Amino acid sequence: MLPVVALVGRPNVGKSTLFNYLTRTRDALVADFPGLTRDRQYGRVRRGQKSYFVVDTGGIVETELGIEEQAMRQVNYALEEANLILLLVDARQGLSAGDEAIAERLRKTGKPVLLVVNKIDRADLAVVAGEFYALGLGEPYPISASHAIGIDALLDEVEARLPAPETPEVEEESPGIRVAVVGRPNVGKSTLVNRILGEERVVVYDQPGTTRDSVYIPFQRHGKAYTLIDTAGIRRRGRVSETIEKFSVVKALQAIETAHVVIFLIDAREGVTDQDANLLGMVLEIGRGLVIGLNKWDGLSPDQKDNVRRQIDLKLPFLDFAKKHYISALHGTGVGHLLDEVESIYEDSMRDLSASRLTKILQDALAAHPPPLVRGRRIKLKYAHQGGQNPPLIVIHGNQTEEIPGSYKRYLINAFREALDMQGTPIKLDFKSGV
Ligand code: GDP
Ligand code: GDP
């Protein structure tokens, strides 16, 4: 599980500026995809060997609330989901009553908090940081989010305080293909999980009590080992009173991060919502194999079906690599094919690709459609080799690679996808200049 860092503070102290700085992605691939709306409130920080989620609580807006209530609501949210909270304050404005109210709330909880004094980019403001000692949250960390001052020192401290990741344990406890079932509340996640475990003639192993947010259920299908990552929390058949689970984006992100393949469920009767698109953007960014289940396909009229199919292409053009399955978790229709798909996606995402084959595909693609000229010089791409699996990472060496436009990267990805006949997994490219 990756740890979670939450940014809290009054409006305008610089939370989203810091968030954007921390999560700015070096992977231009994602940013280059047209039509990809991303929930800017959740992101992943990667720094050296460290990786963690960061949440900008300021983006979690509940419009009917006043500013003070709004801030408190965000603090409560952060308290629930975060391992570490960064309280941002504004050096230009100095200490305010709003800061004190938030600090007081935070002091009463046991959560670790770092006090971050932002906007110290004017030299005379660095001294101001001292006045925030009064908040009783220890030493203030002076930074400028917009001028990238003090951030390394801050992140060193953040990382020192985060719990160590538990990856080896996940590998041990979750044999085989890890499949996460993800989607908004009520799309049919638990119905699908019950269907998979109940009717696919799977062997379910005893599940020891777990303290994790998601439930990990090992099972076998056609002699293959799987672990189902159930973000809804299994609701056993026959249980009458079911509490509606509170939707947690962090829980969904953790599940995506841990999975090899994500089954993303959409309620076909409701169509593709913004929240669906945002979550799907994160699946793409984290880079997992993906199959989209349009659930509740039973009982839709032909018109409604046409409508949903159109919507999918319109709203999710960046997911053209993912197969769409029209299913009914309730009746079981299409569920078997969905699981077959999971297996083939997993195999694609874990394939070994030889450098000679990748280089040949690259050269064919270059010959069919050469890269553009940049200031009179042609971008040169020379050879390719595999840099990783799940998702398949293809490293391409050449020169002026930082000038390659997004459209050309997409062209190359499609060329690799076609030549390798690779479906359902994102393909990532990494360019190295200077050969
Ligand atoms: P949020 O409401 O807490 O998310 O605040 P924003 O990130 O939207 O920032 C509010 C304003 O402060 C914006 O105009 C930012 O450009 C500005 N800002 C953010 N960080 C800094 C900084 O380090 N120095 C200065 N001078 N302005 C900043
Ligand atoms: P979750 O919150 O995503 O786990 O959703 P649930 O599995 O609890 O399902 C929410 C509601 O949708 C329940 O009333 C289900 O019976 C219903 N549902 C789930 N799958 C289907 C389906 O394929 N067709 C129909 N018609 N209803 C479904």
Image (cartoon, rainbow, N blue to C red):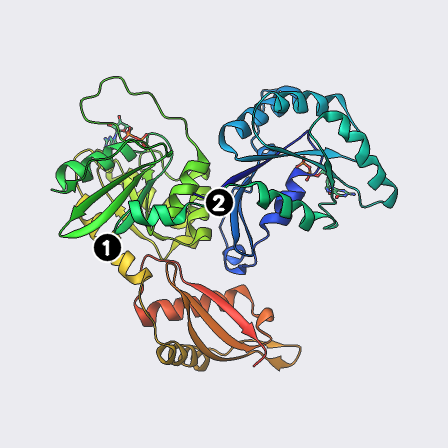
Task: Name the spot of residue 319 as percent of width and height, x first.
Answer: 40, 53
Which residue extends farthest left? 201
Query: Which residue is pictured at 58% across the width and 27% down the height?
Result: 74
Q: What amino acid type is highlighted by mark number 1?
A: Glu
- Residues 315 and 383: in front is 383
Spatial CA distance of label 1 from label 2 is 31 Å
Q: Any mark on residue 343, and which? A: 1
Dot 2, crowdedness within 10 Å: few (<14), some or many (≥20)?
few
Q: Any mark on residue 164, and which? A: 2
Query: Which residue is pictured at 48% across the width and 44% down the height?
Result: 164
Residue 92 seen in the current view = no
Q: Any mark on residue 363, and which? A: none
Q: Secondary structure at mark 1?
A: helix
Task: Name the spot of residue 419 as percent of width and height, x first.
Answer: 33, 72
Q: Quadrant of residue 102?
A: top right
Image quarter hosting the N terminus: top left
